[in-house]
Image (cartoon, grey):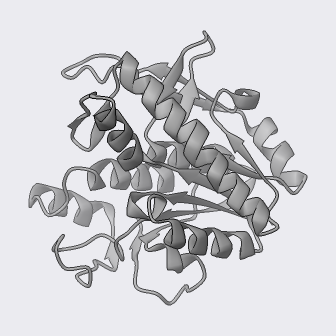
Amino acid sequence: MKEKLRIVKIGGNVINERKQLQSFLKDFSDMDSLKILVHGGGKRATELAASLGLQTKMIGGRRVTDEANLEIVTMVYAGLLNKNIVAELQANNCNAIGLTGADANTITAHKRIVKDIDYGYAGDVDSIENKSIELFLNNGIVPVFSAITHDKKGQLLNTNADTIASELAKGLSGNFEVELIYCFDKKGVLLDIDDNDSVIADIDKNKYEQLKADKIIAEGMLPKLENCFESLENGVKKVIIGMPELIRNNGMQHTSLTL
């Protein structure tokens, strides 16, 4: 029987609200299964870019990363946020290590090929190095991944954190029973973006396509759900979306994804 592994992605305003983040990290530390944390931080990166007079451009919920913005997201994701999260986990007796895809060659990617849109230094994942990640897990060390990967040619790349969580889940599903959890500042996928209680409890692939066609799901939620279904199609056992408190309260309202 495969050992259970929970991969949790945290994002949204939770990253920027110190007390909420601390509460989440305490709950994450208390999880008794093997675990990996993946974090975003786009809002913080956007704020820093603005303070430096740099424009942030988003298309379809994805960031366009020019050279200047790549420096910003690397500093924010892999530096400030990642190390603060790791320090907070250590304070909760959770022995963690902060990583980018370049560290231990854990996640390799390539610069996104330009088709209709040039996303700049955006990375699409090529491979997950299971052995390095499993080495950490098997020695009681919790990997904490920021949203930065590399191309094995010395180039860092900005890679969507939802995608990183999904790719890790897919890559590790051969040796573990993987549960993928997306936590952000909504109770789940909503019928009405302005009503946090309008949670859609269950979404399968057909329902997703209909919600997308009806434009109920748009912008940043689109790549998140695309990653969810791709994970389920590639061996991940369970995918759920909800608020951070979900990881300690399974009965809390949330969205479950099925094929």
247 horizontally vs 26: left or right: left
**Viewer-proximal residue among 209 and 239:** 239
Q: Residue furthest top?
A: 153
**Residue 112, image quadrant:** top left
**Residue 243, image quadrant:** bottom left
* Image: 40 above or below 4: above
Q: Residue furthest bottom?
A: 251
Q: Residue at x 50, y 59 (%)?
A: 10
* Image: 87 above or below 161: below
**Viewer-proximal residue among 203 and 53:** 53
Residue 91 visible within the image: yes
249 horizontally vs 123: left or right: right
194 horizontally vs 128: left or right: left
Which x, y percent locates residue 223? 33, 47
Q: Residue at x 43, y 55 (%)?
A: 228
**Residue 48, image quadrant:** top left
Residue 35 visible within the image: no
162 horizontally vs 210: left or right: right
Q: Residue at x 47, y 45 (%)?
A: 161
Q: Quadrant of the C terminus?
A: bottom left
Which x, y percent locates residue 35? 71, 61
